[in-house]
Image (spheres, rainbow, N blue to C red):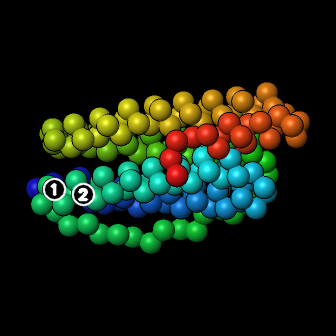
């Protein structure tokens, strides 16, 4: 069984992960509306990953003999100024999630819950990758600038991301 503080925090993290998924799906919808199908594809893959992350926490809570309590998910923004600004928001969001994961790890350490610390190691590694990927796309978009041809090439590159 999880301690009450850790159980509550892990339940809250499910909400954060599913909120992240909802944000990325909203971003994908915006990109589809802007005729950027490659960007939309990349963000839909991200949406699915975040949903999987939420389910990892969901299953872990049950594996430890506790109950899951789902909370409401806030409506995400629906409009974004540009692909560059959108991905700057992606990076800031991922940094926020990194902080949340780090806080969970600190709590698991305080509670001397070694199993949860081990489970959270996967998320810590994943967050390094998430921030790296967002940063790489931001740097690419900075190089693209306002060039429509370059933006189309970037869109094509993001469309190649694995996932359906």
Q: Decide if residue 14 is on the left or right side of residue 151.
A: left
The residue indicated by pointer 1 is 63
Work out whether 60 lies above or below 137: below
Image quadrant where residue 148 sits:
top right
- Does residue 133 appear left or right of residue 109 in this picture? right
Taking 102 as reference, is 80 above or below it? below
- From what the image shows, is residue 154 above or below residue 16? above
Residue 107 image point, x, y percent: 26, 43
Q: Are marks 2 and 1 in contact (CB under 8 Å)?
A: yes
Is 52 drawn above or below residue 106 in the view shown?
Answer: below
Would you call the spot at circle 1 few (<14 residues within 10 Å), some (14-19), or many (20 or more)?
A: few
Q: Foreground residue, 124 or 159?
A: 159
Image location (x, y in percent) of residue 16: 44, 56
The residue pinned by badge 2 equals 59
Query: Can residue 22 be seen from the camera position used here?
Result: yes
Pinpoint residue 154: horizontal percent, then vertical percent.
74, 37
In the image, taking residue 47 as reference, residue 110 lies left or right, namely: left
Compute the Cα span from label 2 to label 1: 6 Å
Give percent across and percent down for residue 91. Answer: 59, 40
Q: Split into 4 quadrants, where in the image is the N terminus? A: bottom left
From the viewer's perspective, tell me whether residue 101 is left or right of residue 134: left
């Amino acid at each position: 069984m999880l301690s009450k503080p850790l159980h509550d925090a892990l339940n809250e993290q499910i909400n954060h992960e599913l909120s992240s998924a909802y944000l990325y799906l909203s971003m994908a919808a915006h990109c589809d509306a802007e005729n950027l199908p490659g960007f939309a594809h990349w963000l839909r893959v991200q949406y699915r990953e975040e949903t999987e992350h939420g389910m990892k926490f969901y299953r872990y809570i049950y594996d430890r003999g506790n109950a899951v309590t789902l909370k409401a998910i806030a409506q995400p923004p629906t409009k974004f100024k540009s692909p560059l600004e959108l991905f700057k928001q992606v990076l800031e969001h991922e940094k926020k999630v990194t902080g949340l994961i780090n806080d969970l790890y600190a709590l698991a350490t305080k509670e001397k819950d070694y199993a949860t610390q081990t489970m959270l190691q996967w998320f810590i590694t994943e967050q390094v990758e998430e921030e790296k990927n967002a940063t790489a796309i931001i740097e690419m978009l900075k190089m693209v600038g306002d060039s429509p041809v370059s933006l189309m090439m970037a869109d094509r590159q993001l469309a190649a991301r694995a996932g359906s």
